Image (tube, rainbow, N blue to C red):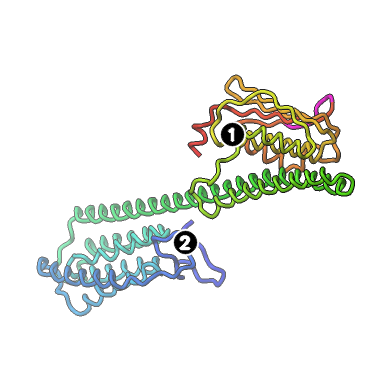
Amino acid sequence: MDGEQRVRGDGAPRWWRQGPPWWKGAGDEGRAARWPWLSTLLLTLFVLAGSNYAARQQAERADLDAFARVLLVIGAGLLLWRHRRPVLVVFGTAAAAMLYLGAGYPYGPVFLAVALACFNAIVAGHRKAAWTALGMLWAGHVLVAHWLYRWLPPSGDPAAPWGQEGGIAAWVVAIVAVSELARTRRDQWARDRAERARAAQRRADEERLRIARELHDVLAHSISVINVQAGVGLALLDTDPEQARTALTTIKAASKEALGEVRQVLDTLRTPGDAPRAPAPGLDRLPELVSQAAGAGLTVELEGSAPGLPPGADLAAFRIVQEALTNVVRHSGSRHARVRLDHDGGALRLRIDDDGPATGTDAGGSGNGLAGMRERAAALGGTIEAGPRPDGGFRVLAVLPLKVKAKEDDR
């Protein structure tokens, strides 16, 4: 929508009020435009010098006098406000040029100020104002050159040839076309900047989600082990101090490992882009995970083996198994779980079963863990199914594609 058609709440047309510079986008509305002193001064000097030269080449036109120079200075000097009052400037420069030509002064760079004002107005979004000002200037020139010339100076001036009007019309079309092209390019740049900003925001959101998911998986597993072992230690502190000591040792090992993994995640925040100090966990650490689960009182049967996986897929598979076993420790009455790994048809299948029964309403987990598993699988093009088994207990089934290297490199 054109700026001159909108009206502010105080009753003043928007085009009359201060607007943003043409080179700035909508997000820069609040910043004041700088005054283009230097360019306006140089253009004014050029217009004056060029008009003096044109006067010597057009002896049939009226001589430049003080009034002509005032009109030239006004027309070029109005450009000082071109970023703040684009519509006022385009009409003002057109009026000054019309008076200058109507007084019979020689043709010359007087049109340069009008062209620049029109360019600025169109790029700033005031198309109708620019087109109207140029149309009025051209129509006024036609009247002066083919009808009013009989009564206007210089005396004895003949009518202008119609071919000259065609040339002027061509220049008007060229000015409008260049201005519209510049506006289109500026709008495209603004859209590109906005898209880059949105893409950067999406990447930041995805990174925050990844870190939150990683921290959840690390802390949920470790704290579950610590919670179970703390309960064992408290229960056996008086009757079986040796078993209580074993529980405390497990708590110490689990907390140390959790601190190390949390530190590794936080290091990626402090020094983005640097390689991690320790490799990310993968399926090769499943025996260690089984040992930790045994320390929490959960017996885990591990069946099958996994092929070599890219780091991202290897980490996702490990975290899925870890979260599933954590849910068994926290939410299942069973002290026995089975982890089976199969790979065929270009996919890795992870199946984690427990025999139940559930110890509370959150049989499969709190919801965040399952959501995190699904997000990890979806990021690799895989799927997660989690729910009660028909014969009792709970099952988590993950299917991860083996060929995910190219997808990870594209991210």
> Residue at point 71% right, 45% down?
222
Quarter of the view holding residue 138: bottom left
Left or right: 245, with 195 as reference point:
right
Q: Name the outermost residue toward the top.
A: 345
Front residue of 359 and 24: 359
The residue depicted at 80 percent of the width and 44 percent of the height is 228
Q: Please give the name of the residue rendered at 74% of the width and 46% of the height, measured from the top-left corner.
A: 249
- Disc 2 marks a residue whose amino acid type is Gly
- Mark 2 highlights which residue? 3
Instruction: Return the x and y of residue 270 as percentages of the image width and height.
Output: 54, 55
Instruction: Kindly identify the amino acid type of the residue bearing the numbered disc 1.
Output: Asp
Image quarter of residue 40: bottom left
Identify the element where label 1 is drawn: helix
- Indicate which disc, 1 or 2, sits on the residue closer to the N terminus: 2
| Mark in the foreground, 1 or 2 | 1
Q: Which residue is mark 1?
A: 314
Q: Is residue 34 left or right of residue 99?
A: right
Residue 296 or residue 310, whichever sits in front: 296
- Extreme residue in the front direction: 242
* First to last magenta residue range: 386-391
Percent x, y for residue 1?
49, 56
In this view of the protein, which residue sits in the foreground, 325 or 254? Answer: 254
Front residue of 10/44: it is 44
Is disc 2 surrounded by few (<14), some (14 to 19) or many (20+) residues within 10 Å?
Answer: some
User: Quick one: label 1, few (<14), some, or many (20+) residues within 10 Å?
Assistant: many
